[in-house]
Amino acid sequence: MTLLGALAHLPHRKAWHLKLVVSLHDVGLASQLQQILNGEYQPILAGKQSDVKIEVLKVVPEGMGALFGQQLPPKLTVLDFGNGTTLYSRYNQGKREVHTPFPAGVEVLIEDIAQKMKHINGGKVGDVSKIRFCLEMGHTKYSRDIDIKDVYSTALKDWYEKYLKKPVNMTLDAKHTGDEIWAIGGGCLLPGFKKLLEKNGFKIRDNPVEANANGLLQMAKVIISKNPVTASK
């Protein structure tokens, strides 16, 4: 379980009691997710045993965390440019009415760059972790000697045309009918892409990479504060 793996990187505790708010693309699977996560475990974390109790407080639709605590416009469309998916969601008076996942995210772009850069990488496929790192840092310097700027530019256009054009056009259509349009997810910060989104009227949320996770944390705190007796069990 990824969650337990993450705990291994924190200072050791003999016991953990984790209270979670989690998000899911398909909330119809919420009860199954709760069954999987809820429970008590005795993992070995970084060589030491711990008792870990996990309690799921709430399951919400993916992307909802980014809206928590925000002043929402009456009509809102949100595009979430994630690693594995691009999510299109429409809200009316704060209630989500449409949620459409598109099965291609930033990882598709990075894999395409890795293939397209062979001619400047000695005929070898690029290292996706190195490509991801430089893009996350906001530049295209794959290494001290290799700049993937031209490859990136070509791959970004291909990625947009093949995978993003439809959800972006759907969002711009929503803007035409009066929606405010927001963008979240790490894809917002790709070199040059943020400016393109803003030029088309998108409002980029603060800290778009962690906006959803931070919102889920705030939800959990609110739930615990409203139910202190239940939360302290």
Image: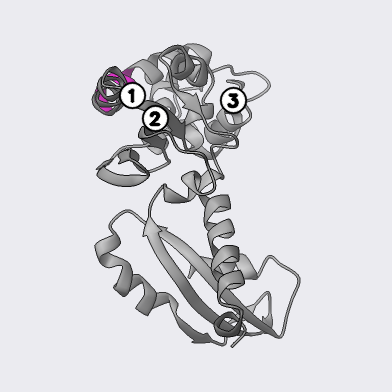
* Disc 2 target residue: 109
How far apart are labels 2 and 1 at the CA level?
6 Å
Mark 2 residue element: helix
Q: Position of residue 173 (x, y in %)?
A: 25, 20
Crowding at label 2, few (<14), some or many (≥20) Cα neighbours within 10 Å? Answer: many
Crowding at label 1, few (<14), some or many (≥20) Cα neighbours within 10 Å? Answer: many
* Chain-order first, disc 2 or disc 1: 2
Mark 1 residue element: helix
How far apart are labels 2 and 3 at the CA level?
15 Å
The part of the chain drawn in magenta is 158-163
**In the rendered view of the protein, which quadrant contains the C terminus?**
bottom right
Q: Amino acid at mark 3?
A: Tyr
Circles 2 and 1 in contact, beta carbons < 8 Å:
yes
**Residue at 54% across, 28% down:** 189
* Disc 3 target residue: 142
Q: 179 left or right of 57?
A: left
* Disc 1 target residue: 159
**Residue at 50% across, 22% down:** 122
